[in-house]
Amino acid sequence: YELTQPPSVSVSPGQTARITCSGETLSVKYGHWYQQKPGQAPVLLIYKDSERPSGIPERFSGSSSGATLTLTISGVQAEDEADYYCQSADTTNTYELFGGGTKLTVL
Amino acid sequence: QVQLQESGPGLVKPSQTLSLTCTVSGGSIDSGGYYWSWIRQHPGKGLEWIGYIYYSGSTYYNPSLKSRVTISVDTSKKQFSLRLRSVTAADTAVYYCARGAVVAATVPFDYWGQGTLVTVSS
């Protein structure tokens, strides 16, 4: 099983960024999203496709359709420039998978 | 607030065993509902799940590393540990410990340690 993300996404401040994650397992398993800034540990942004942990700004949202997970960042700010990773599990629930990561550049 | 802290040698020689410990504070390690996890990140690369352990001792490992990995837990010390045998330069990475919360048969990692760089070199 693999999770595929675009290597990079660029967006201007104030616009909407969408980052996708595709993989067969996502059609039957929930997915999660993380944000990682340089030199820092990842932070859980979205879990169970669309749930937001407390403390995560409302501009971060998630959705799922078929075998594709989407992270949407509305009103992108300069501070959102980071790497974003999706995560899910194989269908037998025996191991966890991460996508390759997407670097979000705020122009 | 749950906190996790990795500790262990930052330099390991090739063919030896990498050993790291994660100490958990601000929460219980022996209550159900959580998998205590190790995740690594090669320099400039993405995240790789290594494996996790339940407080009862049940373990799950990345198939690509399974033959070399052991994760154990010491609930009395609120610690869990990683041992990776027969390391090579390809095991040089930042190693993170993390808490995985079981949510609807899925395991998002909600708390992470700061990470520790382990370099494999003679």
Image: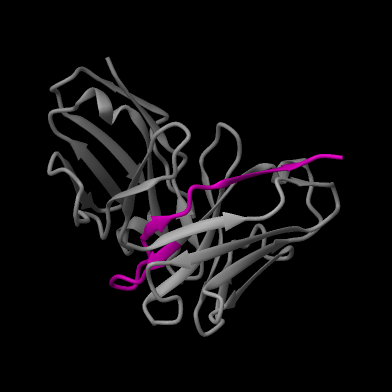
x and y percent of residue B37 in the render? 51, 63
Q: Residue at x 22, y 51 (%)?
A: A65
Q: By what rule are the colours in the image chosen?
A: one colour
Q: Nearer the viewer, residue B30 or A75?
A: B30
x and y percent of residue B19 in the render? 71, 60
Q: Residue at x 30, y 70 (%)?
A: B103
Tell me if B2 is positioned left or right of B98 in this view. Answer: left
Q: Residue at x 67, y 59 (%)?
A: B65
Spot the residue most to the bottom: B56
**Residue B50, image quadrant:** bottom right
Spot the residue most to the top: A107
In the displayed structure, would residue B62 be above or below residue B102?
above
Q: Nearer the viewer, residue A10 or B22?
A: B22
Tell me if B60 is positioned left or right of A80 in this view. Answer: right
* Residue segment shown in magenta: B99-122
Q: Nearer the viewer, residue A70 or B109?
A: B109
Tell me if B96 is positioned left or right of A75 in this view. Answer: right
Q: Residue at x 45, y 76 (%)?
A: B29
A73 falls in the magenta region: no
x and y percent of residue B7 in the render? 62, 56
In the displayed structure, would residue B93 be above or below residue B60?
above
In the displayed structure, would residue B35 be above or below residue B117?
below
Quadrant (top left/top right/bottom left/bottom right) for the C terminus of chain A: top left
x and y percent of residue B72 in the render? 62, 74
B120 falls in the magenta region: yes
**Residue A84, image quadrant:** top left
